[in-house]
Image (tube, rainbow, N blue to C red):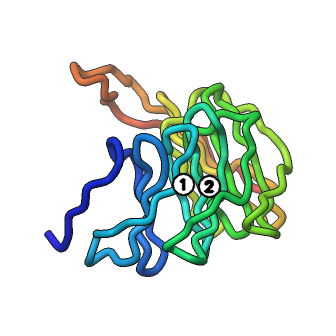
Amino acid sequence: LLSRSLIQGPARTVAFSGELVVIGTGGGLAVFRSAEAIDAPSYLPLDGEPLDIVVKGSVAYAAAARIGLVAIDLSDPAAPRETFRHGTIKTEKLALSGRTLFAADTQGKLHIFDLADPRRPLFRETRKLTDAVLSLDADGGILAVVHPEKATIFRVSTDGSMRLLSETAFRNASKTAGGARTGGAVKKGLLRN
């Protein structure tokens, strides 16, 4: 254990940016200046609980319950400040790919934002997904979306457009006592241009 600190409310999510540690708590964000000394955080209250956080450079993006997508400027870690709020969507999961931010909502929709100005994301489009999103991640132009009974992989171009690469259904999925699903997977195929 390197450090311990009291934060407001239960911690739900965490993200790193260099030496900064950003923790989503019951009612906002706690920003710590060093992962090795988690003490004396600065705190930014939000009107909703952060369910997911991603960081790009000196900007954090929070999927906050009840208030939607929020952008927070971390250039002064002692005084984080909100720079953008998109309250018409109720985001739960976030992922970044290049200058594109993906925000999955509670109705199985994927909202796509351009980050040409990282502090003020520009809404680009919404795509309806086939099912609720359990997890979302992106790396190197690939976006992975996990649904209750399948996973979908997309290629993301530099302009943020998406092309389906693969979809895998979880065959014979059954719920365990804890609600987790078990069973094998079957790949439906790789799509190519």
Residue 95: x, y in percent?
A: 59, 55
Residue 62: x, y in percent?
A: 57, 51
Residue 42: x, y in percent?
A: 44, 65
Tag 1 and tag 2, C-beta contact below 8 Å = yes
Q: Quadrant of the N terminus?
A: bottom left
**Residue visible at 42% across and 37% down?**
185
Look at mark 1 in the image and give the residue it sits on. 137
Closer-to-camera residue (181/2): 2
Q: Quadrant of the C terminus?
A: bottom right
Picture quadrant of residue 183: top left
Mark before the other along the chain sequence, 1 or 2:
1
72 on left or right of 113:
left
Give above or below for 84 relative to 51: below
Residue 5: x, y in percent?
A: 24, 61
Closer-to-camera residue (47/119): 47
Look at mark 2 in the image and give the residue it sits on. 143
Instruction: Tell me how many marks there are.
Output: 2
Closer-to-camera residue (74/179): 74
As measured in the structure, the alpha-carbon distance from the residue carrying label 1 to the one carrying label 2 is: 6 Å
